[in-house]
Structure formats: C-alpha cells, structure tokens
Image (cartoon, coloured by chain):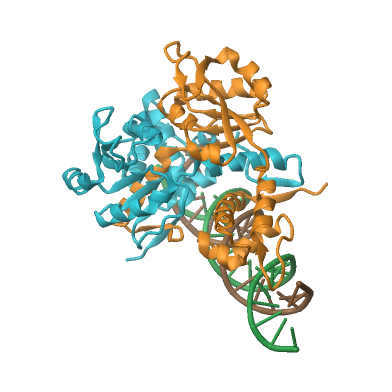
Chain colours: A cyan, B orange, C brown, D green
DNA sequence: TAGATTGTTAATCGATTAACAATC
DNA sequence: TAGATTGTTAATCGATTAACAATC
C-alpha cells in the first residue's frame, strides 16, 4: 500500500475549510468554487485545489464543489464523521476552562473524564464531571473507548502523565505543558504553547524597530 | 536599511531554546554546544546554528556558547528583556484561566486588565483584577502602556473586539476565537485554535487506518 | 457551443540539512 | 599543536504558486 505524505499545513487548512463550509451550508449555499473558498479563508485558490487533490476529486470542472458534499468529504478525511471522547488530566484553571469549552462540543469533542493527583481537587465538580484520581483512568478509558488525552498539568508533571496515558492505551495527546514530551513511535502529539505565541508577538513588536522582519504573509 | 526575512519557525525555536537555556542556567551549566542544545530540544545542530546566524555570531569556535550570554541575547532578540503588560477581552472560563496562567507571569507577561461586555461579568473578581466594561479600555491601555491584547470572546464577537483594540492603539493580538480576523497592515496576530489542533489528532488517528501519513517529523 | 473551473504538472520559492573552511 | 565546534555556503528537500489542458 502506497503511503502519501500530507503536509501538516494541509490538514490545518482542511479544518479551516470545513468550518467555512459549515457556515455556507447554514446559509443555504449549494455550490462554491475553489477561488471563493480561497477568498473566504485567506489562501490561494491553487492551494485549496492542491490540498483537496491529496485526497481525491471532489469537484466538477466548470462548476465547482457541492458545499454539502465537500463538507462531508472533508469531515470524513479528518475523522470528524463521529464524536470523539476525550479525557483531560489536570483540573486547574486551564483544565476547567477546557471542560466547558463550547467549541469542542460544537466540533464533536466530548470530555468524558477529568483527572488530577491533587487531593484538594479530586471530587470537585466541573460542569457535569467530578474530578477523579488518576487511578480511575483505565476504567474511564475503557468505558468510553477514549483514544485522545489532553494534558493540562504543570511542565514538570507532563512527561510522567504522558507516560501513564500511553501505558493505558491513549494514542493521541493534546499537550498544554510547555515542555518537549517524549513518546513512543505511533503516538500523535500536538502542542499548544501559549507563551511561544506571545513571544512571536513581542518579537514582531520589537523587530519592527530593528532590522528584522517576520517572513510571514500578512494576516488580512 | 536592509530588512532580513526571518522564518517564523525560527522565532518559535528561539523561544524553545530560551526556555532550555534558562533551565541550564538554573543548573549552573556555563557552556553549551549547538549539538547539545539540539539534542535537548529535538532539532538538528545545523538548525540551531542557522537560527542564531540570522541575528549574529554568539558562539566561540571550538568552544560553543556561553549559556548566560546566549540566553540574554535571545531574550533581547525576542523582546523579553522587559515585562509586557497585556489586556484580555472576554471574562469567560478561558479568559479567567488565562488571567491566572502561571507560565505567562514566569515569562514576563502581565495581564493588567480584563474586559467584558456582559453586565453579569463586569465587576466580577478574577484573581486580583476586577472585570471592567469595554469603555474603560482606553484608560487602562494608556495607564499601563499596553501594546498586546488577548481575545477570548466567542467567534462572532471577535472581529469587532479586534477593531476596538486596534482603534485604541493595540499593536499585537493573541486570538483564541476560531475565526479569521481581518486587521490593518502592521498589526501582528497569532491565532490559537484548539479545535484545529484536536482535528490534526483525529486525522492522525483516522489516517493511520487509511493510506495517508502526516508529513511531520516524529516528536521524540 | 462558449465560459468557467477543476485537477495536475512544472516552476518557483523558502526552509532545512550537509559539509567544511575558519579558528578557538 | 590537535581536537572541537562555530558560522556559512551549497545541496537538498518540501511546500506553494502559476499555468493550462481537460471537461462540465
């Protein structure tokens, strides 16, 4: 079986396209061209067609794409044609905010368990979930067939939490701890590093008074 | 004046290097080579040297880099040789979590004002800040010389919030709303889109049973 | 049919990696 | 001096863009 390599940026853009198409569908738009999508999300039309071409032929020459169908194809590609059950480790402020994060629910992500090691936090109610001790992880993972875990613990605890997740069968991790987590091959990870994003901003602000310039297309 | 274009990935890595160097400094390490840095953060040594080369010559041939000095140079490049005052719009769960986010404080980011339009939220206490109405934005921005704003409002309010920020002199935005914000030239933006990150994970999980493969070096 | 737009190939652009002369 | 490691150039790799034949 031939394996096609897909740029990660393509996957990011597919998410963006899917959101845009969802809006269009809600508005009752039936057909759309690659250049209209491009216009709507801020990329080039060649980029849109190229991104889609990795996965198949979804359009009609001379006509464009059927909004409903394309949305459905993209959702299928991304694995969004089902809901996903997640667990979250770390019941601090950030963790609590994520449990109630509406966008996750809207996109089909369901947090079914919140865990912490801190005795003060265990038993605490967050939305409709009670914070559980980490010992209960295996039960919840099995019960809800969980494959994705969110790490929202301090940096120094993150690696050991990741190890526990992997040991219990978690296959993908969304990590908020600002640290490079080491994982066995085959486990996917995405890092969300809020300070790094802020530091890209302070660089821009500082660099504009220096001789540097971020090599980034302007967002607009 | 010649303008050098810097890859955005380079800036991201500089943040990572700086964190790693800070750890080394704390441990009392005096000198380090590009390959040791590379090893520590998970990139190639050529990458480390190339990233630094955009900004100057910081090392000594045959010896390596002085940890303290290199850290200080990188912090200066990123604009981290000062603290930054931020404001935050949107006092929901996510906003509240960000106000108390320890990593921001550790890296020199100071949230000095939290704003909302919701009468229920105005006046509420979050850590040592009271939620203020958006009318008070100009006062706070001036008083604390704020140049960076964080948007943590729902997607449909994000563009108008951004417009208000820009009108009041904000020059850089960290945006958590899952929407493409349009800004005048010269305003920097970084988007944090949590759903997109999760969808990259569901893609990985789904794709591994299909014929695709993310073109991404393995994280490890 | 004529006009529009896809899917795809080739050209371009940019970032990463390899290699090594310079030099501490 | 000999060994180590930088800074930098050239080679490679990968992603984006341009262009256009195919075709609805």
Please tell me whether residue B19 is drawn above or below residue B34 in the rendered image: above
* Viewer-nearest residue: B135 or B178: B135
* Viewer-nearest residue: B39 or D23: B39
Name which residue lies at 26% across and 41% down.
A85
Name which residue lies at 57% across and 62% down.
B37
Name which residue lies at 35% across and 62% down.
A184
Q: Is residue D16 left or right of residue B216?
A: right
Q: Which quarter of the figure has residue B107?
A: top right
Name which residue lies at 52% across and 59% down.
B41
Q: Position of residue B21 (x, y in %)?
A: 58, 56
The tally of labels here is 0
- The answer to whether residue B120 of the structure is visible from this angle is yes
Q: Residue furthest front?
A: B28
Q: Residue furthest top?
A: B119
Q: Position of residue A131 (x, y in %)?
A: 26, 35
* Viewer-nearest residue: B151 or B41: B41
Q: Image quadrant for the C terminus of chain B? A: bottom left
- The answer to whether residue A43 of the structure is visible from this angle is no
Please tell me whether residue D24 is drawn above or below residue B30 in the rendered image: above
Q: Is residue B50 left or right of residue A115?
A: right
Q: Position of residue B144 (x, y in %)?
A: 66, 24
Q: Which quarter of the figure has residue A17?
A: top left
Q: Position of residue A102 (x, y in %)?
A: 35, 28
Please tell me whether residue B59 is drawn above or below residue A90 in the rendered image: below
Q: Is residue A190 left or right of residue C15?
A: left
């Amino acid at each position: 079986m031939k394996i096609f390599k897909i740029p990660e940026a393509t996957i990011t853009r597919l998410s963006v396209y899917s959101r845009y198409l969802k809006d269009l569908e809600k508005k009752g738009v039936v057909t759309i061209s690659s250049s209209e999508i491009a216009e709507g999300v801020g990329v080039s039309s060649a980029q849109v067609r190229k991104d889609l071409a990795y996965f198949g032929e979804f359009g009609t020459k001379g006509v464009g794409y059927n909004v409903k169908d394309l949305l459905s194809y993209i959702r299928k590609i991304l694995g969004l044609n089902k809901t996903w059950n997640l667990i979250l480790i770390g019941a601090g402020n950030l963790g609590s905010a994520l449990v109630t994060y509406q966008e996750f629910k809207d996109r089909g992500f369901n947090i079914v368990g919140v865990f912490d090691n801190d005795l003060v936090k265990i038993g605490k109610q967050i939305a409709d979930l009670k914070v559980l001790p980490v010992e209960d992880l295996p039960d919840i993972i099995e019960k809800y067939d969980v494959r994705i875990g969110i790490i929202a613990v301090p940096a120094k605890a993150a690696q050991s939490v990741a190890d526990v997740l992997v040991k219990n069968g978690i296959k993908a991790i969304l990590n908020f701890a600002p640290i490079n987590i080491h994982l066995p091959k085959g486990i996917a990870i995405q890092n969300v590093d809020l300070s790094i994003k802020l530091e890209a901003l302070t660089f821009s602000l500082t660099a504009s008074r220096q001789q540097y310039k971020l090599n980034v297309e302007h967002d607009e």
